[in-house]
Amino acid sequence: MEALKPPLMGLFEKCRARKFNLYVQDYSETDPKTHEGMNLITVTTRDLIADDRYLNEPALNIVKRMKVNTGRGGIMFIVYTLKTGSWREIQRRYPYKSDLMLHGILLSGGLHWLVNRVRGSSSVIISFDLAEEHVQEIPLPCDLVDAKGYIVGVFRQMLCITRCDGQTHNEFWIMKEYGVRESWTKVRISMPYSLLLHSGFKRKNHDLLVFKDRLFMYNFNGERFRKLSVSGFPIVTEVGIYLESLVSPNSCRGGC
């Protein structure tokens, strides 16, 4: 048993944001306590996050919240922007359904979910682009029409799907080239699993994985692994990545 080292501790601080998008839970323009007097109209994006394209835009333009509504007719995305101070429905209801839509998987500037089409009930991955606010389909492997029992994740900055249906498995799929169906490839793993979650975190030759409810650092080259323990967390059900390049508006006072 190995204790988790400091560089990995950030994985347990959830930060569901990337690049120029921030989810702000408690911001109120009329309550200075929520933003410590920072003016998002004048503060540029450079004060919040370093990005090559959006550094000189007012931060007010790019701070968003988003929620997803599901119903019989499909999925509706609703966005709240600080610039307008109101919720806004994306123009259409998308023809997909899902029994349970948890937080999306963040990759390539979009949030991803594994869903079924309303017509025909075939499975597909959808991506909601946070900047352009539109949805695109990401095709599944050619021989995988029904993805019931699968979950979507990120493996080394690539989309992956893993079968977690209560049975024992020893492989999962990765999409080597984003959006290209033919690039789906199977990856074998020497540890049979019934529940496998990918963190998206890799250090040297090891990937951080969750097998059922335990953390492991797994070496796919030598098929070796070691178990990790975190004080106060005897059981691990989910992991996320803390992005240190993002700065909370609450931490800025007259600039960051």
Image (cartoon, rainbow, N blue to C red):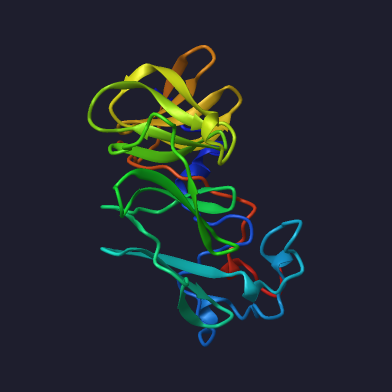
Please state if 11 lies on the left or on the right of 50 as rendered: left
Against 148, residue 90 (above or below) is: below
Q: Quadrant of residue 95?
A: bottom left
Against 242, residue 32 (above or below) is: below
Residue sitting farthest toward the front: 120
Please state if 84 lies on the left or on the right of 58 as rendered: left
**In the image, residue 210 lies at what x, y percent?**
38, 32
Residue sitting farthest toward the top: 222
Please state if 52 lies on the left or on the right of 235 as rendered: right
Residue sitting farthest toward the left: 166
Against 201, residue 193 (above or below) is: above
Q: Is residue 256 visible?
A: no
Q: How many marks?
A: 0
Given residues 234 and 219, the one toward you in this image is: 219
**In the image, residue 104 lies at what x, y percent?**
43, 52
Q: Is residue 113 visible?
A: yes
**Residue at (31, 22) in percent of width and height:** 169
Q: Quadrant of residue 131?
A: bottom right
**Residue at (51, 18) in percent of width and height:** 220
**In the image, residue 256 lies at what x, y percent?**
70, 66
Specify the quadrant that holds the N terminus: top left
Please state if 111 lies on the left or on the right of 195 as rendered: right
**In the image, residue 214 lies at what x, y percent?**
34, 31
**Residue at (45, 78) in percent of width and height:** 87
